[in-house]
């Protein structure tokens, strides 16, 4: 965990800004994208998603040894394919599915799978003397990539920062996050390929109809998704990768075997149940626009939050937000805008260089631009909190006025 309550200690106010409303206000921790926004939906759904697991069930490590990912539950695999077909956000045919403890584990499994040269695991070329493969992503990039890549000081790969600044020959890995965390933009790879020595990983955590128009089924060789951001069940720690190459699927499985001997079956079964309930609700396509269906409900919620946020920011002479163009969404059947999971706030006030610090003075905990390989005049703030927290965030943002007022 990166941000702590202590970090948000108020340390006086900047001269030209109005003071925080009250020193007794609680800290609003919007540093993480904890998706509690969807709790309201799942409360309404009630018992329909309840899963009962008997003491005698799901005891084995193994699910199906014939599959490259031998700990993948059949029910989970079939329902994620069903969900992708429903939303139209990814091609699932002729792909291997690898389940992970969140997409965090899958990212690391992929780095290992792509760079390991162990021939017994399907590796090609290279030897013990190979140099660590650089891992890059266009800035602003998801801050955890840098930390996760270098945390164990692997000899196989190393973080090399902003993909726009990468100009080395030889093998490399580029991560493309689309829509992007932190700024919500739709992205493609940016490194000019030197031969076919680069591998591109598509982190599609936010390619779901509540956040962005679904313009086509993603059809990349390596892409991964997460239960955390699709339905909001971050606590189950489930993610999945769709990969074309069997050798990569097997090496990812090896990594997960060595780090956790598989992935919780209880979680896979819970995830399968929840995603199945979503799919069943859409069975009757006459009701596609029904706001009781998860993706309609979630999109309305996100749209409403962005509308309120934009109104506050429009009145502010301190902050600005990115603009997103409308595109036709194949899922909703209409033109929609993006409603990202995070606000990428820019502090445009002259003389205020540190947006994170400014927010902290008002007890709003966000994450500063520098962590994303960007400018400190930016900060990322989560839009996925519970309603009371989001409302308080708007109220605090409203009182931050520049000295020109
Ligand atoms: N990738 C991106 C772009 C994310 O924003 C997140 C979560 N913040 C993750 C990966 C990790 O998600 P998970 O909960 O599946 O580990």
Image (spheres, rainbow, N blue to C red):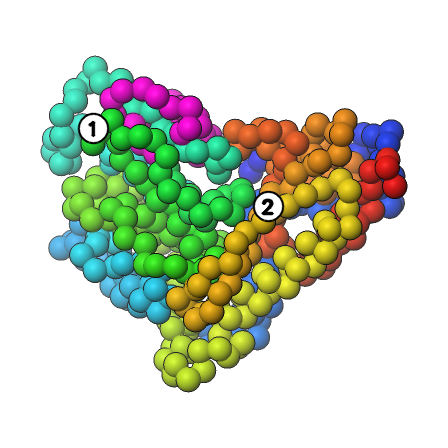
Vertical relation: 28 (above or below) 208: above
Q: Residues within 10 Å of mark 1 (few under 14, many from 20)?
A: few
Residue nearer the viewer, 141 or 249? 141
Residue 148 can be seen, yes or no: no
- In the rendering, at what x and y percent does residue 176 appear? 38, 40
- In the rendering, at what x and y percent does residue 196 appear? 20, 32
Residue drawn at point x = 63 percent, y = 57 percent: 306
Distance between mark 1 and mark 2 Cα atoms: 35 Å
Q: What is the quadrant of residue 214 in the picture?
A: bottom left
- In the rendering, at what x and y percent does residue 270 appear? 40, 64
Instruction: Answer left or right for 398 relative to 283.
Output: right
Residue drawn at point x = 35 percent, y = 69 percent: 86
Q: Residue furthest top?
A: 129
Residue nearer the viewer, 397 or 389? 397
Inspect the magenta stretch and tell me whether residue 168 lies in it.
Answer: yes
The residue indicated by pointer 1 is: 195
**SS label for mark 1:** loop
Instruction: Answer left or right for 30 relative to 10.
Output: left
Residue 402 can be seen, yes or no: yes
Q: Is mark 2 within 8 Å of ligand 1?
A: no
Residue drawn at point x = 47 percent, y = 69 percent: 334
Residue nearer the viewer, 133 or 116? 133
Residue nearer the viewer, 239 or 284? 284
Q: Bounds of the magenta span?
A: 145-174
Q: What is the quadrant of residue 351 in the picture?
A: top right
The residue indicated by pointer 2 is: 322
Q: Residues within 10 Å of mark 2 (few under 14, many from 20)?
A: few
């Amino acid at each position: 965990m990166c941000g702590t309550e202590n970090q948000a200690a108020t340390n006086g106010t900047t001269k030209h800004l109005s003071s925080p409303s009250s020193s007794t206000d609680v800290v609003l921790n919007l540093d993480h994208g904890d998706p509690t926004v969807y709790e309201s939906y799942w409360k309404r759904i009630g018992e329909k998603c309840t899963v009962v697991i008997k003491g005698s069930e799901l005891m084995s490590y193994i699910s199906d040894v014939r599959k490259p990912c031998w700990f993948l539950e059949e029910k989970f695999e079939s329902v994620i394919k069903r969900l992708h077909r429903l939303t139209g956000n990814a091609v699932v045919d002729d792909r291997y599915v690898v389940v992970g403890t969140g997409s965090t584990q899958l990212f690391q499994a992929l780095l290992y799978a792509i760079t390991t040269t162990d021939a017994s695991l399907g590796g090609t070329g290279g030897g013990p003397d190979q140099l660590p493969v650089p891992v890059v992503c266009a800035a602003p990039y998801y801050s955890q990539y840098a930390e996760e890549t270098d945390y164990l000081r692997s000899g196989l790969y190393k973080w090399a920062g902003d993909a726009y600044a990468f100009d080395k020959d030889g093998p490399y890995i580029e991560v493309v996050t689309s829509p992007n965390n932190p700024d919500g933009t739709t992205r493609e790879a940016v490194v000019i390929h030197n031969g076919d020595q680069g591998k591109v990983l598509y982190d599609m955590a936010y390619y779901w109809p509540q956040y962005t128009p679904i313009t086509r089924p993603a059809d990349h060789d390596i892409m991964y998704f997460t239960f955390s951001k699709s339905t909001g069940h971050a606590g189950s720690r489930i993610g999945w990768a769709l990969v074309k190459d069997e050798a990569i699927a097997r090496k990812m499985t090896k990594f997960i075997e060595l780090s956790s001997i598989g992935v919780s079956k209880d979680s896979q079964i819970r995830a399968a149940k929840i995603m199945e309930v979503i799919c069943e609700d859409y069975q009757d396509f006459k009701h596609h626009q029904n706001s009781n269906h998860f993706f309609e409900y979630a999109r309305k919620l996100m749209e409403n939050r962005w509308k309120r946020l934009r109104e506050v920011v429009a009145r502010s002479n301190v902050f600005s937000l990115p603009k997103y163009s409308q595109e036709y969404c194949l899922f909703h059947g209409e033109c929609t805008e993006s409603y990202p999971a995070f606000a990428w706030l820019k502090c445009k006030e002259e003389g205020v260089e540190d947006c994170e610090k400014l927010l902290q003075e008002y007890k709003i905990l966000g994450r500063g631009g520098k962590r994303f390989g960007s400018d400190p005049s930016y900060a990322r703030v989560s839009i996925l909190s519970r309603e009371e927290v989001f409302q308080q965030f708007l109220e605090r943002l409203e009182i931050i006025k520049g000295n020109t007022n």
